[in-house]
Image (cartoon, rainbow, N blue to C red):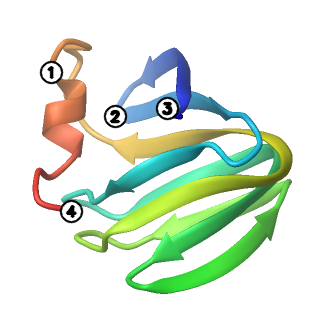
Amino acid sequence: MPAIIGHHFVSSDLYLKEFTLGDNESVTQHRHPIDHVTILTEGCVVLEKDGVRTVHWSPAFIMVERNIPHAFTAVNGAAKGYCTHITRCRDMDIIDQVLTLEDA
């Protein structure tokens, strides 16, 4: 099942996308053209990044380098967090296309 995407926050050049995952739900594999940070505020996730799996318990600050395929899966219950990106894009209709590369 896909993540529930909540609020979007934009301030200056910083964009945050809130997400909530139920137990065993995932944010599917994808990649970004710039480095970014996921801030895990609740729960536990398994990050699969470039073929390696790591476990992160909240609170956590998870760095993901640009062009690296990655996915998150909630384990041991629900998880909530924020994907953070530096961008000048303000158009919420295209921001996912700007920040996510097609061929993960």
Rendered view: 97 above or below 70: above
Q: Which residue is mark 4?
A: 104
Callout 3: 10 Å neighbours few (<14), some, many (20+)?
A: some
What is the CA distance from the residue labelled 2 to the residue labelled 4? 25 Å
Asked whether residue 88 appears in the rendered view, the answer is no
Q: Amino acid at mark 3?
A: Leu
Mark 3 vs mark 4: which is more N-terminal? Answer: 3
Callout 1: 10 Å neighbours few (<14), some, many (20+)?
A: few
Which of the pair 28/18 is nearer the observer?
A: 28
| Relative horizontal placement of residue 21, taking residue 89 as reference (left or right) | right
Q: Secondary structure at mark 3?
A: strand
Mark 3 vs mark 1: which is more N-terminal? Answer: 3
Q: Amino acid at mark 4?
A: Ala
Mark 2 vs mark 4: which is more N-terminal? Answer: 2
Q: Residue furthest bottom?
A: 52
Mark 1 vs mark 2: which is more N-terminal? Answer: 2
Q: Amino acid at mark 1?
A: Ile
Q: Quadrant of residue 45?
A: bottom right
Q: Which residue is mark 3?
A: 16
